[in-house]
């Protein structure tokens, strides 16, 4: 299960070639995005154009299957946050929630960000 991180969604919206190539290579598979990543992208749309920006972003990403932040995902994120904090390798609360959602689902996070490498047991695909 491929799960698109915020960086992948933003790069898609900006027409970045590397994510476009990945998406073309995986067009026959369902693609998911954690709802926390969708939230981050919607925030960007809202800052640019208010409600209209959110609506445009939602339409542009209608092909993405939302991957919900469940209680189990939140608990997984709490474990990840504690592990990273103890190791002095924090990645930020939103990315911890994204990592917890993806790791709980047994998915692979598709990202341009290398800090997800710090999360033990999280399958990672960097498209850049």
Image (cartoon, rainbow, N blue to C red):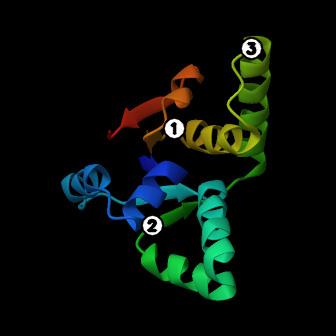
Q: Which residue is mark 3?
A: 88
Q: For this view, does 2 lie left or right of residue 17?
A: right
Question: Residue 46 appears in which quarter of the rendering?
Answer: bottom right
Q: Which residue is mark 1?
A: 106
Label 3 packing within 10 angstroms: few (<14), some (14-19), many (20+): few
Q: How many marks?
A: 3
For residue 78, above or below residue 74: above
Q: Secondary structure at mark 3?
A: loop
N-term-proximal mark, 3 vs 1: 3
Q: Secondary structure at mark 1?
A: loop
- In x, y percent, where is residue 29? 30, 57
Disc 3 or disc 1, which is closer to the eye? 3
Would you say residue 38 is visible in this rendering?
yes
Disc 2 or disc 3, which is closer to the eye? 3
The residue at 49%/50% (across/down) is 7
CA separation in Å, label 2 and label 3: 33 Å
- In x, y percent, where is residue 54? 61, 79
């Amino acid at each position: 299960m491929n799960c698109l991180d915020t960086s992948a969604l933003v790069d898609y919206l900006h027409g970045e070639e590397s994510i476009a190539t990945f998406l073309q290579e995986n067009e026959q598979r369902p693609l998911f995005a954690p709802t926390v990543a969708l939230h981050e992208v919607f925030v960007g749309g809202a800052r640019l154009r208010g409600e209209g920006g959110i609506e445009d972003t939602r339409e542009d990403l209608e092909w993405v299957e939302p991957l919900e932040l469940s209680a189990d995902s939140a608990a997984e994120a709490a474990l990840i946050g504690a592990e990273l904090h103890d190791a002095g390798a924090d990645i930020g609360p939103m990315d911890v929630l994204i990592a917890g959602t993806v790791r709980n689902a047994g998915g692979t996070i598709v990202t341009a960000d290398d800090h997800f490498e710090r999360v033990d047991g999280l399958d990672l695909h960097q498209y850049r």
